[in-house]
Amino acid sequence: MAMLTDQVVLITGGSTGIGRATALICAAEGANIVIADVQDAAGAETVAAIEQAGGRAEYQHCDVGDFAAVEALVAAIASRHGRLDGAFNNAGIEGPTAKILDLDPADWDRVIRVNLSGVYHCMKAEIAQMVEQERGGSIVSTASAAGLIGIPGAAGYNSAKHGVVGLTKTVALEYASRNIRVNAVCPGFIETPMLDRVTEASVKIREQMIGATPMRRVAQPSEIGDAVAWLLSAKSSYVTGVALPVDGGWVAQ
Ligand SMILES: NC(=O)c1ccc[n+]([C@@H]2O[C@H](COP(=O)([O-])OP(=O)(O)OC[C@H]3O[C@@H](n4cnc5c(N)ncnc54)[C@H](O)[C@@H]3O)[C@@H](O)[C@H]2O)c1
């Protein structure tokens, strides 16, 4: 039996990378997927790939940093599908690699806006809908191993991802009694366009990442998608407030 049969699932940042892989997996598990992103052409391509595999998906342009746009997105899903069962708040950007003295306040603001405020905006709109429909729900957000440990040179990104972990635990406690589960995944190094951008400066960075990972490899985005599909599904029905590392053992060290 498929894990997400007929569930209505929103995936932000679903045009590429981890979000795209998760959308394909959740659609194969029977979910009706709504992808929200700012890369419209890639979003349309992901929808086409899901449909080609026999799944159901649609694309909506939405900048998660804009609360009004996120509210409108969730309202449109509710009016079209009658409900929202699950959400994967995954949209994110990498910040510059710079120690705090070289970290420009504008870059700090940009990363916090998308990676932390974006998750707050999504959770707020999603929870409002889930409370109203009175059938519970499951929310998963993408934090990072960088949300669990400090990494020099990424103060904005690390602070945003630590914030996502704190937000996840707090909102999980606030809505546990309404059967709305709220969890986070904390990926290590995953083969996506973001990793390509971060490592394009030198092959040495990639080698260092692999060297720092006990399993001695980067992961495929579907390895995050499998964990997210489980967290979205009733298979994890008693799991809430968790920040789950999916990182080849990195933060266990
Ligand atoms: N790749 C890794 O190694 C890794 C590790 C830990 C955490 N993460 C996190 O995983 C998530 C997905 O990243 P990815 O690696 O798949 O990279 P990616 O760049 O392939 O995907 C990010 C997606 O988010 C979208 N996006 C960016 N800003 C947006 C906005 N304002 N509104 C809506 N969508 C927006 C992008 O268009 C893109 O489709 C991010 O939150 C990232 O921080 C990635």
Image: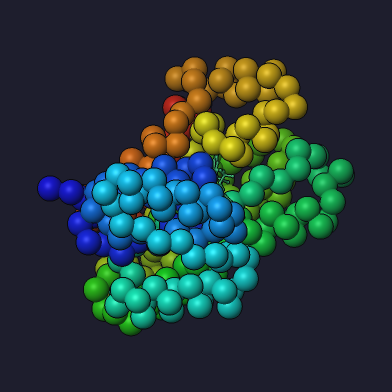
Q: Is residue 149 above or below residue 90?
A: above
Residue 175's quadrant in the figure?
Answer: bottom left
Q: Position of residue 136 (x, y in %)?
A: 27, 70
Q: Residue furthest left?
A: 1
Q: How is the image coloured?
A: rainbow
Residue at (49% x, 20% y) in the render: 217
In-image side of 15 versus 202 (left or right): left
Q: Is residue 95 at least partly visible in the picture?
A: yes
Q: Is residue 224 left or right of residue 53?
A: right
Q: Quadrant of residue 163?
A: bottom right
Residue 208 in view, yes or no: no
Q: Which percent across, then down, holds residue 166?
A: 52, 57
Q: Nearer the viewer, residue 90 or 247?
A: 90
Residue at screen point 67% across, 58% down? 112
Rendered residue at 68%/34% (across/down): 198
Residue 119: x and y, percent? Answer: 53, 62
Residue at image x 68%, y 23%?
A: 205
Vertical placement of 172 versus 95: above or below?
A: below
